[in-house]
Amino acid sequence: MSGSYTMPYRIKRCIIGMLVLLGTHAAAQDSLRVADRGDALAVIVRPSADSITLRWAPLTVGHWMTANKYGYTVERFTLVRNGKVLRPVERKALTTAPLKPLPEAGWEKFISNKYGLVAAQALYGETFELNIEQSDITQIVNKAKENDQRFSIALFCADMSPAVAKAEGLYLSDKHIEKNVKYLYRITVVTPTDTLRGSAFVDAAQKYILPGLTDLTGETAGNVVTLRWNQQEHASLYTTYIIERSEDGKTYTDITDVAGVALSKKGTESKYQYAVDTLASLDKPYSYRIKGRTPFGESGPISNIVQVKGHKVVTSSVFITSALSTDNKSIDLAWEFPEADNDALAGFEVTRSPKSSGPYKTIHKGLLPPASRIFKDTSPEQSNYYKLKAKTLDGTEILSMPFLALLVDSIPPVQPVGLKGKVDDAGNVSISWKPNPDNDIYGYRIYRAYYQTEEFSLKTGEPLKDTVFTDKVELKSLNEKIHYRVMAIDRNQNHSILSEILSLALPDKVPPMPPVWLPVKSTKDGVVLRWTPSGSVDVVRYELYRKGDQGQWIRLTSVASGTDTLYTYTDRNLQSSTVQYYTVVAVDEAGLESPPDAVVSGFRLTGPKPPVTVSTPTIDRANKKIALRWTYDEQRVTAYRVYKKTNDEPLMLYRTVKENSFTDSGMIPGKKYSYQVMAVFDNGALSDMGKLIVLEF
């Protein structure tokens, strides 16, 4: 196999489906029962009559890449037998060598397995770009980093095929089990510097029964059917779902991988799963059912069956083109709607309201015929807002925009005058004006703007009956004034022109802008802090703070603000090389403080720590032990790291001890053992590595 796999076009179409299905892969990972939330590997188990099957997966792309390199080791711990807790527990290694993904050549046998081909591409392909027709979901996936793509697709393929999971080193079946026993399985990845772990507990006698789905529903829009079911209820069991369709209600076909079928979650917090299919015909019903599929390759029971039928989709809009009165007693309405869509209509409905916001009421009995395009309102009000509803055969309502028709009075009220008001220190605004002299005044509308040059926005819903208005404004802004205008409305919905602008001054409550840190310098003399001035012109000083040992902020100094473009302060009063944390605050003339600047850190530099010198080791061949001892005069040492290697194996961290000695046991005659020791200080510093001690046992 070459470094970049060549896949037929049909396989690329399968990849498209897989990418769409990756929304469900997160739910599959949520179903992994992790024994310890601090673990790096998630593990699930499946008990059966003669075996226990394990599936696992790394939780991050970094752990996945590490595990692919070093492999997985599987151990079984027998905790309880016949109701009795075992002490000590029985421990058994189930792998003779770490499980790793098959080498590149080993994937040749998956040439007919679409998930195997994609997994191989994820593991060994030189590039992972997918040359496919662009769509919303593919644009999202193509923006992801390549390693994240490989990680997600590889785990998804493992969930879809047990054979692929086994080939990726993510699957093991333990066939040597006992009935009345409870086990703990542990998966580990041992690296030269760390160990990744994951574990799961299982009762071998536990019954494993897959539930069926009972809440499948289906809705159609034209020739598109949308299926919905509750995936959250069984998220701990099912990785994905198989969708089946029937045209006669008897014979069902799996359509999960057919182009045009897509699985997706609507919102990351949604408990529902959705599938979309396109109906070939609008003249006959179709039946659908689904069943869940687990990461072990098992299918759950069949769900309830839903039957749907397509219908013609009406995408046209309805517009009222005129509403005229020739006698000042009735109003003639006319509207437009494509005649070609009449066969999809149940009819029209004319509604009316005295206000544009409603409520709107139907003004005739029954539906107007689909061919109707005119209607006479014989009992209108003086002010009439009309909306037209086009109702389709499938129950959809197409609503027009409101259309205003007035009778008789069209003279607006006079402009409101006498506006006055004030703003208090809490941002409470009160304004008033003189009552309008017109006899048919219905109310007033209030408009507000932060700048006189911008468009004023409406602040009232229903018109105010009174001539007083209260408001609340945010004082912590860059605005110095707030502006208001008033409009009068009569009973016939005639609007006056807006009043003259009332401008009110705002109390100053705006804190200054914070200064900006420049890079911190850690030196032998201390921590050098530098910052540029605040952007606010009324800043008088800068308060510099350092975080104390108890987490409290301690003020170091106060620096007067001037014309400098750079401020510098060196924290020299540091007794150790422990990392210190700093922030700075700008203070203006009113005593208002800016938000604290981002926390920065630095420390006093110290010289390198000397290596640990190990004394001549003591070899106890009778008891198969090697004793190491050392002396180290440096202060503030919290622990020692002991590194070990056997024969020509790589040197690895073996133990961390508090004492100045360590005894290793279980030595094997004829083998060569090597050790090195490193000191760890309380501030996280490390000494140089000590001399390598080599022993022939």
Image (cartoon, helix red, strand yellow):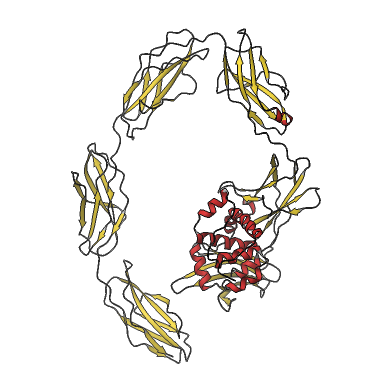
Residue 142 placement (x, y as % from top left): 53, 54
Q: Is residue 202 visible?
A: yes
- Residue at the image position 71 percent from the left and 49 percent from the top: 214
Q: Residue 320: name its quadrant.
A: top right
User: Quick one: quadrant of the N terminus?
Assistant: bottom right
Q: Work out whether 433 lies above or below 311.
A: above
Residue 365 placement (x, y as % from top left): 71, 19
Q: Work out whether 416 lies above or below 342.
A: above
User: Quick one: quadrant of the C terminus?
Assistant: bottom left
- Residue at the image position 70 percent from the left and 27 percent from the top: 339
Q: Residue 407: name its quadrant.
A: top right
182 vs 289, left or right, is left
105 vs 449, left or right, is right
Of 1 and 161, which appears nearest the observer?
1
Residue 352 placement (x, y as % from top left): 61, 19
Q: Work out whether 597 lies above or below 199.
A: above
Of 479 and 340, which appears nearest the observer?
340
- Residue at the image position 18 percent from the left and 44 percent from the top: 563
Q: Is residue 304 visible?
A: no
